[in-house]
Image (tube, rainbow, N blue to C red):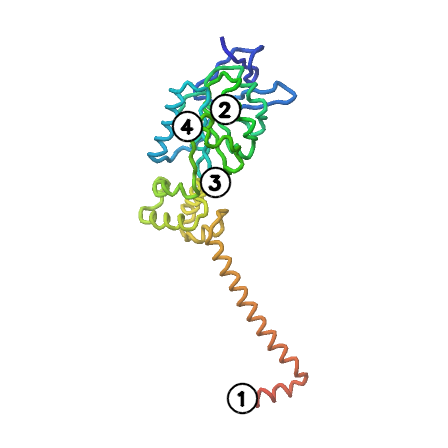
Amino acid sequence: MSEFIKAGNKILNKPNGFDYDLINGKVYNLKYERYGVGSYFEEDGSLSLPKKVYTTKDDDIFIKRVNTYFEKTSKLSTGVMLSGVKGTGKTVMAKVIAKNSNLPIVVVDEDFPTSQINDFFRKFSTPVAVIFDEVDKHWDTEDLLGWLDGVQTNAKKLVLFTCNNEDRVNEYLKDRCSRVRYTRHFEANDNARFLKEILKNKGIAENEIESTYTFIVNNFNLLSIDNILSFIDEKLMFPGLSNEHLLKDMNISSDSELSINKESKECESEEDEDEDEYDEENDNNEEYDNEDEWLQLVTNTFLN
């Protein structure tokens, strides 16, 4: 007997509607209608992963380890916390783990009230992978403690958190393997590991890969895949422009912007000095109301 029904595009706990079983590998958004059906799943098309996902051997081991533990453990909840600055690959990692789990994948909507999560998950027992993207930004993690402990829940769940600021995550999630078993921190320059491979795959000339790699690593404050791919696109589209010229006009934070701004300010200062000198000469000229007096002064200066 199925645990869900499907009414239109909404997948609800019974009582009324067509029987529905959650499908392994399929993506569902967990949503909430305060004055409607309450909590419900909505089918989604995909995880929106990039065509090419770059991972290291260590990443692959981590992904396999998480899923292997979840398969073998009898615990109802396995938590994973992926933290670090934005754009470093946390969300992609969470999606890859979820995809490789071959479980139904639940993406929690940012407006879903965590106060409702226990009540919803205790109504079914289908194992699922659950993604809370930017948990520190959208939810009060204190409300999730009991749910992660397995209190009042029947569904075995692989819970994947991403967060930008670990200080905003409840302290009782830290050093508690029963709630969050695995953690991984992402640094701003982690994607440098894949940069040369990305440059090659995107079609940067072989003799330009090393110099482009060095320029990006030395000048990008954040080596996000988004920034890297955008810069490469610009480089391929405008081959006549230097790397410096390309970066200067892009929405990519860089220390080199400071040097560019500094040069501009220095030029402005020099212009101001020239204007001041010109003004001083004009002021001196104004002291002589009579043109003959001024000419006489100039003549005497040259004669002396």
Q: Nearer the viewer, residue 173 or 195?
A: 173
Vertical comparison of 121 with 182: above or below: above
Q: CA distance from mark 3 to mark 1?
A: 69 Å
The residue where tag 1 is placed is 302
Answer with mark 3 or mark 2, whichever residue precedes in sequence. 3
Mark 3: secondary structure: loop
The residue under label 3 is which amino acid type? Val
The secondary structure type at the circle numbered 4 is: helix
Q: Give the CA separation, mark 3 to mark 4.
A: 19 Å
- Label 4, label 2: how far apart the Cα atoms are: 18 Å
CA neighbours of label 3 inside 10 A, class few (<14), some (14 to 19), many (20+) = some
For residue 148, the mark is 2
| Residue with the most extreme top position | 1
Q: Does the CB distance between marks 1 and 4 fall below 8 Å?
A: no
Number of the label disc, if any, that sits on residue 85: 3
Asked where in the image residue 142 lies, by quadrant, the reply is top right
Q: Nearer the viewer, mark 1 or mark 4?
A: 4
Q: Is residue 96 above or below residue 22?
A: below
Q: Nearer the viewer, mark 1 or mark 2?
A: 2
Q: Which amino acid type is shown beneath numbered disc 2?
A: Leu
Label 3 vs 4, first from the N-terminus? 3
Q: Whole-percent x and y of residue 64?
A: 36, 27
